[in-house]
Image (cartoon, rainbow, N blue to C red):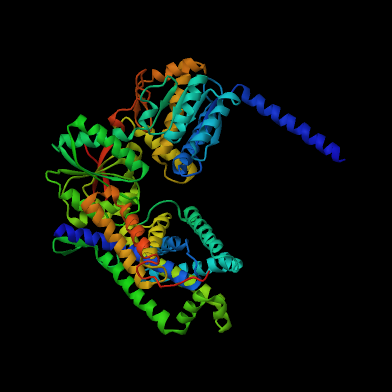
Amino acid sequence: MSSFLQFLFSGVTIGATYALAALGFSIIYNASGVINFAQGEFIMLGGMAAVVLVGLGLPLPVAVALAVLAVALVGLLVEKFAIEPAKNAEVVTLIIITIGSSLFIRGLVQVVLGKGSHALPAFSSDRPIEVGGATLLPQSLWALGVTLVIVVALAWFFTRTLQGKAMLATSHNKLAAQLMGINTKTILLASFGLSAALGALGGILVAPITGASYDVGIMLGLKGFVAATLGGLGSGAGAIVGGLLLGIFEAMTAGYISSAYKDAAPFVLILLVLFFMPRGLFGAKVTERV
Amino acid sequence: MKRRNILQWAAAAVVTMSTGAMAQANDIKIGAVLSVTGPAAFLGEPELKTLQLYVERINAAGGVLGRKLALVHYDDGSEASKANSFAKRLLESDKVDIVIGGTTTGATMAMAPLVEKAQVPFISLAGGVVIVDPVKKWVFKTPHTDRMAAEKVFADMKKNGITKVGLLSETSGFGQSGRKETLAVAPKYGIEIVADETYGPKDSDVTAQLTKIKGVPGVQALFVFGLGQGPAVVTKNVAQLGIKLPHYQSHGVASDEYLKLAGAAADGVRLPSPALLIADALPASDAQKAVVTGYFKAYKERFKEDPSTFGGYAQDALALAVDAIKRAGSTDGEKVRAALEQTKGFVGVTGVFSLSAADHMGLDLSAFRLLEVKKGDWVLVP
């Protein structure tokens, strides 16, 4: 029983990081239909920026706030200088542009901040919490808790505020949204800023667990995308459930079958889910007009 | 007007080219193919810097046999196929006297058939056992192997009466090569691998694997084979789960970065490490002390960064080559090759080299030091 609990905690810890990454994908997808492959780099930038700022002697809360702002600014710059000039291009072209941006950001960080790994102190204590013979790090609870808060805040934003509704409207039909007086240009810009800020927050939350280095974004971005697809692209709840499910499934596979299959098992799960529910677990039922 | 310009340029070009050729005619040509860019750049870059630094230093001190050294180097971009064509160029058009390089095992194996055919001594900087096992007449190497790291760990386990070991290896190339060598060499030390688990290099949690290893009946120690931040996550998880088993890591974490990432959780961890990482902590009586601190200082002064073990491989390759050329009294391929093979007790950065016709690496387990982490610092285990 205690080992089952430990596998579960392990899965939740991993899953929380996937969920945070998945959320960022959902926001930009909601606003533009674009899958932003630079999302992983926003996560990496958050962790690295926080490490640098803490290294400069700033207190942790200040460093976290500044890092999130800085990365949000990077998100805005990416939209302004990479996405916007190609605004009338196909979605596929925009996706390829985000891949280019991610390579650029990763390369820049590699040159400026080096290839090493860095540690960030935990938010609260380092002492593991014991529950029923299994242990969990407080930092995992931080990651999970903040993720939940963000989801609630986002749900409120998208359904209760004018800006959020405008974002959703833009994604459903850009032309119609424009005719209704929505400034779709600003919406797209804001979505990049928002998801960059969220990604940065995610990166900062997991940095005390995994450490930060220039190349953490690749894996987190990929798994986050998988989690988002699993949960249903564009759905906040889907991102969380998809991320946690992925993490727990990985941990259970490692614990009960063999860690050699750990990375393969989630993909089997995804194939199954997508086969029976092509839009993911929480995906909107959309019919495309041909 | 225009025409005269071109003629002048041509004349100038001819003059510089011929003086260049004249200056080089009597030089000892060291050819190198390194992975200075691409995925293996973190290995190849310090290797090239080291070669350039030491060629300069040797030339400033009067060269070898009264002749200057000339370094001809190519960057294979971490692609083995390019290493092959650059090796061809070194041998056929540059006509080098000795070849250093092959940053990776793949590149080395791609170059080996060419140097064998051309009969030019070749010193590789890659770790794979296949390079010198079976022995190829013209191929040598300086780095220690993953197998030796595993052996060093097993030797210490044996001393402490440990026979049942849980292995946790990374799914990276380094981790998987380590896993293979560990499994191959374990029976030699009477050690049984009772658990064989893996983790991904960027995993944020491995408590599932550790819980499983902990639950295996009779397991006496944990051996982790990985590189970079993964082993630090493992170390923190071991502390989190309160696992009290003796905890061994590989030489992949032998860097101060690991201490920083794992923090207090790393206390009590044992690992094999090359001498370079603990240059200052080596006792004055240590045979390698002078060479290792000398290299450390020279590299740091010139490049303003700490040298890595990989640069050390290059320094050893060049030093072995120079030593062999001196003893051979010429750059004749066969004479240099024979001299290399007769190298005995040569103190390098990586270890003390004693080569023979049957051993083209010449290092033994003493090239690795067993370290233990105590209060956030490395301590030599006697």
Please give left or right for residue B334 compared with residue A266 in the image.
Answer: right
Q: Nearer the viewer, residue B66 or B275?
A: B275
Q: Quadrant of the N terminus of chain A?
A: bottom left
Q: Nearer the viewer, residue B379 or B360?
A: B360
Residue A145 shows up from this direction: yes
Residue B72 x/y as whole percent? 56, 31
Residue A193 x/y as whole percent? 48, 71
Residue at the location (41% across, 82% down)? A159
Residue at the location (46% across, 67% down)? A71
Q: Is residue B2 above or below residue B11?
A: below
Residue A190 x/y as whole percent? 50, 74
Q: Nearer the viewer, residue A266 or B366?
A: A266
Q: How many marks?
A: 0
Residue B264 shows up from this direction: no
Q: Nearer the viewer, residue B349 or B191?
A: B191
Where residue A275 sits, quadrant-wise, is: bottom left
Q: Is residue B65 above or below residue B101?
A: above
Please give left or right for residue B66 compared with residue A282 in the image.
Answer: right
Residue B315 x/y as whole percent? 44, 32
Which residue is situated farthest in the front direction here? A290
